[in-house]
Image (cartoon, rainbow, N blue to C red):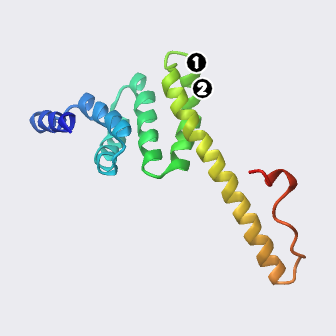
Amino acid sequence: DECWRLAAAELSCRSSREILYQCGRLAFYDGREEAISAYLPHMKGMLPAVPKNVRVFLRFWVAMLESKNGYTLVAARTLQELFPSLEDGPYCSLNKERHAKEVLDVAFDLERNLRRIYEASSAVWLSARGKVPLTPILQEGDAEA
């Protein structure tokens, strides 16, 4: 909480991209919804104004905050674009790569489950309409999932 008070005092004196960026990173690790909601719009707003060499890092933290804010699929799209840069090259970071992999894994599971729900509801709807017989929804490999 002391960190937030210091940041608020500094931002009230002068607006600083660096302070907003660091507060956004802190909001991710803090994890509180109010902190994420407070800094995410500012970080998104900075995207067009920051130099290209900083934009990768800013986009990464925006995606991480979006993921913590419940927008996992939106965050995953950004992280998929950024992932090659996080693995290799001037933006390489094992810590960021690990965080990105965690979000991408959650998004992959979410998409897979959404697809299964859609397929199951479509099969039930078609069966109710008499279009096709209802077949087992679970495949052999899905039983352990």
Side of 118 where 130 appears, left or right: right
Which amino acid type is shown beneath numbered disc 2?
Answer: Pro
Image: 33 above or below 47: below
Side of 70 where 123 appears, left or right: right
At which x and y percent is residue 34? 29, 51
At which x and y percent is residue 45? 33, 42
Q: Which residue is mark 1?
A: 88
Image: 84 above or below 76: above
At which x and y percent is residue 107? 60, 46
Q: Are marks 1 and 2 in contact (CB under 8 Å)?
A: yes
Which amino acid type is shown beneath numbered disc 1?
Answer: Asp
Choose between 65 and 2: the one closer to the eye.
2
Q: Badge 2: few (under 14), some or many (20 or more) residues near its Cα, within 10 Å?
A: few
The circle drawn on residue 70 is none
Outermost residue to the top: 90
Q: Residue at x 73, y 71 (%)?
A: 121
Q: Which residue is mark 2?
A: 84
Based on the displayed image, in which of its 4 quarters is residue 128 positioned?
bottom right
Outermost residue to the right: 133
Quarter of the image that includes the N terminus: top left
Based on the displayed image, in which of its 4 quarters is residue 49 positioned?
top left
At which x and y percent is residue 21? 31, 32
Image: 54 above or below 4: above
Side of 86 where 145 appears, left or right: right
Helix, strand or loop at mark 1: loop
